[in-house]
Amino acid sequence: MSGDAPGANDYVWQQIRDGRAPSADAVDGIADRDAVRLGSDGVARLRRDLRGEVLGAGPLEPLLADPAVTDVLVNGVDGVWVDRGEGLRPVPVRFADPDSVRRLAVRLATLAGQRLDDASPWVDGLLPGGVRLHGILPPLVADGAHLSLRIPRRTSPDLAALEQWGMVDGPLARVLGAVVTRRVSFVITGGTGSGKTTLLGAMLRAVGPEERIVLVEDTRELAVEHPHVVRLQGRAANVEGRGEVTLTTLVRQSLRMRPDRLVIGEVRGAEVREMLSALNTGHEGGASTLHANAIADVPARFEALGALAGLPTDAVHAQLASALDVVIHLGRREGRRTVREVGVVVREGGARLAEVVPALGPGGRELAGWPALSALLGPLEGTPAGATARVAEDDGAPP
C-alpha cells in the first residue's frame, strides 16, 4: 500500500478481517485525509493508486485492463503468466514474498464475496466487473497462493471476426452460421481455454432479434450481443453451507420463462438431464459447451454426466440422439484456437446408441458425416460439393 496514506493498510485489512469488502467511498476517504498536504493532483493520483491496490488487482491491474488478455495465472512467487490468444506467456510481474501473494488472494476473495483462509483454502468466485477468480492457498500448493483469473470479453465477436482471427475459415463459418439460423441444436467441445465460450457468443449473435435467449451459467462468462437475452446465474453456498442454487434448478426455472433458445454456458453435471429433456420437448436451436478431447468422446461424456443425474446409459443415448444434432470441436494449433471439426449426431446402425460422426474439417474437407449434416442444413452457398472423403484418410492429420 502506498506510503502516502499512513494507516490505510491497517484500516483496509481490518475491514477484510471483519468480512467486509472495502468500498470506493472508504478508499477515497483515505486519500482525502491528505488533501491539504498533497493538493488536488496528488489526491487524484493517490485515489487511483489506492483503488488499484484495494478495489482492483494491485500489480495485476494493468494485465486485467489489457483487452487482448483472456487469462492471468499467478504461480505463487514463481511468476505470472498471461494468455493473449496465442498460448500462455510469462510476464515481468513479480511478488516479493509468499505473504504478498496471499494478501492479494485474500483481498480478491473478499471482493468476490467469498472467504479464503486456512479453514477454506480455496475459492471460486466472481469479481466486480465479471472477472472469474479461482484461488488456492498453501499447503495445497507450494511457494505461495496461486490465482487463476479468467477475463470475460467486453464485446462478443461475430463469426466474420473469428474468420479474420483465423479461428474459423470461410466454409466452416458458413456452416456454423447455418447451424444457428436453421435452429439446429449444438454443443461446442474442447479443452480449457480452447475458445468454446468465444465461439458460442459469436454464434449466438446470428440468432434473430425476435427470438428470446435464456442463458444459464454457473458463473457469468458468456458475452452475447443480442437484444433479448435473459441471464440466470448459479449461486454457491454461503459459509454456513446454505443458499446454493445449482444449474439443475436454474435449467428447470428457465423452461418456465418461455425461451426460444435455451443456452447452458457449460454442461458439467446433473443438469444434463433437464437440458436433454428440454431439447426433446420442442426447444429447438439450444446450445451448450462441454469439456471433451474429441467429438468421438462426446457420447461417453454425456454417459458420465447422465450417471450423475441417475440416468441409465440407454436413456442417455436415446435422448442424445434425438435432442442434439451437431458437435463443434475446438483445439489449439501452434497456440492458436481453431475449429478442428464439425460432427453430426447419428444413431449407430439404427441401434439406440448415439455416436458423433465427423462431417466437416477445416478448408471445407468433407468427411463421412457430411451427407447427414448437409441433410440437416440444406443447400449452403460456398460449401463443398465434391465426393465425401474417407475418415481414415484424415486420421492423425493436423487441420
Image (tube, rainbow, N blue to C red):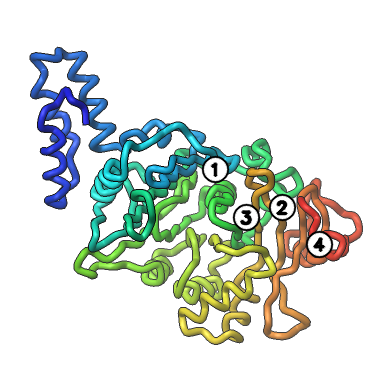
Mark 3 vs 2: CB contact within 8 A: no
The crowd level at tag 4 (other Cα within 10 Å; few <14, some 14-19, many 20+) is: few
| Residue that badge 3 annotates | 180
The mark that comes first in sequence, 4 or 3, is 3
Mark 2 element type? helix
Q: Is residue 364 above or below residue 120?
A: above
| Residue 256 badge | none
The mark that comes first in sequence, 4 or 2, is 2
CA–CA distance in space, label 2 to label 1: 30 Å
Q: Amino acid at mark 2?
A: Val
The quadrant where residue 3 appears = top left
Q: Is residue 348 left or right of residue 310?
A: right
| Residue that badge 4 annotates | 395
Mark 3 element type? helix
Residue mark closest to the camera, 4 vs 1: 1
Q: Amino acid at mark 1?
A: Leu
Q: Amino acid at mark 4?
A: Asp
| Residue that badge 2 annotates | 175
Q: Amino acid at mark 3?
A: Val
Q: Is residue 187 left or right of residue 173?
A: left
Residue 104 locus on image (x, y percent):
29, 43
The mark that comes first in sequence, 2 or 1, is 1
Choose between 138 and 180: the one closer to the eye. 138
The crowd level at tag 1 (other Cα within 10 Å; few <14, some 14-19, many 20+) is: some
Residue 298 locus on image (x, y percent):
63, 69
Q: Residue at x 51, y 75 (%)?
A: 305
Check the picture and name the quadrant holding the N terminus: top left
| Residue that badge 1 annotates | 88
